């Protein structure tokens, strides 16, 4: 049973982690360094690291990735140091989820953040005992990206984290971390699906508006 002191500590770290995760370096750094608004120039409007690499430069992308990594790594590392392993319960998952969910549902960007992939990797690194999950995710990604050659980013992410979800369900026995990673996998897949559907609908809306405008002009003339 977790002591009330540790429960309070988890809640405090989780709240701080959510606020820290809500800082979208993918918006801040490209605008400060390159004068580019990633949300405006990108096709999917996603304030994520992949778009920084695509529309800015590799150095800016690396810097952004490190910042996104660090903001999710810090709260997990803090909790890992301050909370002994023997008193941990699934409640520890709040800390794991906090930075990733903050990134996905950023309170500093009206609840609209990135896909959460980079912060997700950071939590796996923060929980040092989950090395097997890191290797599993790497192998899944390599197979989807280079063996099955899935190049569409959102589809690749959905497949990767969907398979990873099934892997955790089947093979992970650590009930301290398992619920948190199942939740994060599901949220990331849903976020990617939402972005993909939204991206598909935008050209259709533009086409309808153009047709409506053309029809209005012909009537006026």
Image (tube, rainbow, N blue to C red):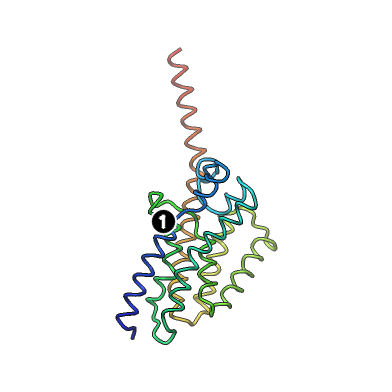
Q: Nearer the viewer, residue 39 or 77?
A: 77
Is 177 located above or below residue 54 in the figure? below
Give the percent coordinates (x, y) of residue 185: 49, 66
Nearest the viewer among 99 and 139 is: 99
Q: Which residue is under mark 1?
A: 105
Residue in view at x 45 percent, y 57 percent: 104
Residue with the most extreme top position: 221
Q: Secondary structure at mark 1?
A: loop
Considering only vertical position in the picture, is 158 above or below 53? below
Residue found at the far left of this picture: 4
Q: Is residue 59 visible?
A: yes
Task: Note whether 199 is above or below 8 in the view shown.
Answer: above
Q: Nearer the viewer, residue 219 or 172?
A: 172
Q: Which quarter of the figure is the N terminus placed in? A: bottom left
Residue 121: x, y in percent?
54, 67
Residue 196 visible, this orientation: no
Residue 72 pos. (x, y %): 48, 65
- On the image, the x and y values in percent for residue 193 come to 49, 54
Q: Residues within 10 Å of mark 1 (few under 14, many from 20)?
A: many
In percent of the image, x 44 and y 84: which residue is there? 85
Q: Nearer the viewer, residue 78 or 208?
A: 78
Q: Residue at x 47, y 32 (%)?
A: 208
* Residue 141 sits in quarter: bottom right
């Amino acid at each position: 049973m977790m002591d009330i002191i540790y429960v309070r500590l988890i809640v405090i770290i989780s709240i701080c982690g959510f606020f820290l995760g809500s800082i979208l370096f993918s918006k801040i750094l490209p605008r400060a360094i390159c004068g580019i608004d990633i949300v405006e120039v990108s096709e999917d409007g996603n304030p994520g690291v992949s778009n920084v690499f695509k529309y800015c430069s590799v150095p800016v992308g690396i810097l952004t990735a490190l910042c996104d990594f660090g903001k999710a790594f810090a709260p997990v590392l803090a909790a890992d140091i301050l909370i002994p392993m023997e008193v941990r319960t699934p409640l520890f998952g709040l800390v794991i989820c906090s930075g990733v969910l903050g990134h996905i549902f950023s309170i500093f960007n009206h609840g609209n953040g990135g896909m959460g992939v980079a912060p997700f990797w950071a939590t796996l690194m923060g929980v040092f005992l989950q090395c097997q999950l890191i290797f599993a995710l790497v192998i899944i990604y390599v197979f989807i990206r280079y063996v099955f050659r899935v190049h569409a980013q959102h589809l690749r992410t959905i497949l990767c984290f969907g398979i990873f979800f099934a892997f955790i369900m089947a093979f992970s026995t650590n009930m301290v971390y398992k619920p948190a990673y199942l939740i994060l996998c599901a949220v990331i897949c849903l976020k990617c699906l939402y972005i993909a559907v939204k991206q598909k609908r935008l050209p259709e809306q533009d086409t309808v508006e153009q047709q409506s405008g053309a029809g209005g002009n012909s009537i006026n003339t």
